Amino acid sequence: MSKLRIAYDRYEQERKRWFSNPMVPTYFSNQERRYVHPFQMYGNVWYVGDSWVCVHLIDTGNGLLLIDAGNCGATAMLVNAIWEAGFNPANVRWIILSHGHLDHIGGALFFRRMFGTKLYLGRPDAEDFQHHPEFSAIQDTGNLADELFVVDHAIDDKEHIDFGGMDFFFRLCPGHTAGVIATFFDVKGNEGVKRAGYYGGFGFNTLQKAYLDDIGDVKHAMRQTYLDSLRKVRDEKVELFLANHCINNDTLGRMERLQKDPSRNPFLDDKLWGEYLDFKRDELLKLMADPAQN
């Protein structure tokens, strides 16, 4: 057997091993099936994510800002969506990363290397990239070229950052990861100035008993930390709720409603933020009361 064939067989064995991970066919294979044509949500805020992971583009007038960078392996889709929306990816000056998981940092290094984009991440997750890289789940991508990085700026709690003349106010909201950020900023559109709010990580996968026990949180303290984070930002004024994953605000359903009747923008809803945070609080309390999770 030729060396070339031996190398190919080794490749096939590795692919079979990779696909044996149940996450792979759902999240990392044929990601193009999740492509969503970009659309304007309100004012200078555009949706350029896919049908699973949200990415928002803000045109500050002095450069483009992305909130999140998509899943690992989905960068080509993100670049295409930015072009399709009518923008040049080379003009993305900043990326705010919601938290340090692989499904939100995918395009970050590409944008930095290609365009000099500056990367921002909550300080605890930025530190975990260095000291606990396994928390990022980068090892699940199946691509050994994927790697973590040192950010250009680690975001602290209650920090204000100016992006192209727009003020973004940040809160650290640990729970899903230690460095989840929430951010709030004003958006001017055809119905006046609206306050946008973004919460950077709602999932309970990192609050399961097996996960917490494995990383050494045997008292499951992060669950209470998550509840405290929800409480911290629950009463922020939010009229434009930007989701971290589409499930958080029915992004695609609202998109369809917007396209059917542009005169009524379903993304403008001053109750949705509080209602969804209350929903996550109640669901987490149920998890905490489950004997199987204790």
Image (cartoon, rainbow, N blue to C red):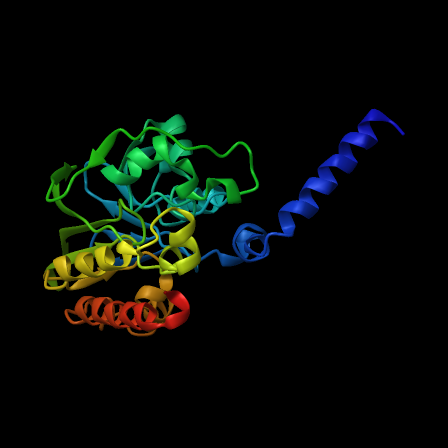
The image shows residue 56 at horizontal and vertical percentages of 30, 51
Q: Is residue 242 above or below residue 290?
A: above
| Viewer-proximal residue among 46 and 178 | 178
Label total for image: 0
Q: Which of the 4 image quarters holds residue 165?
A: top left
The residue at 39%/60% (across/down) is 208
Which residue is the extreme one toward the right?
1
User: Where, quadrant-wise, is the C terminus in this rendering?
Assistant: bottom left
Q: Quadrant of residue 47?
A: bottom left
Res 106 visible = no
Residue 271 in view in this figure = yes
- Quadrant of residue 201 within the rendered picture: bottom left
39 and 135: which one is in front? 135
Relative placement, left or right, of 233 versus 221 is left
x and y, in percent, of residue 283 in the image: 30, 71
Percent of width and height locating residue 9: 78, 37
Which residue is painted at 58% across and 56% down in the image? 22
In this rendering, position of residue 21 left or right of residue 262: right
Q: Position of residue 125 (x, y in %)?
A: 30, 40
Q: Quadrant of the N terminus?
A: top right
82 versus 239 height, above or below = above
- 134 shown above or below 200: above
Q: 43 or 211, which is in the foreground?
A: 211
Relative to 231, say whether 72 is above or below.
Answer: above
Is 223 situated left or right of 24 in this image? left
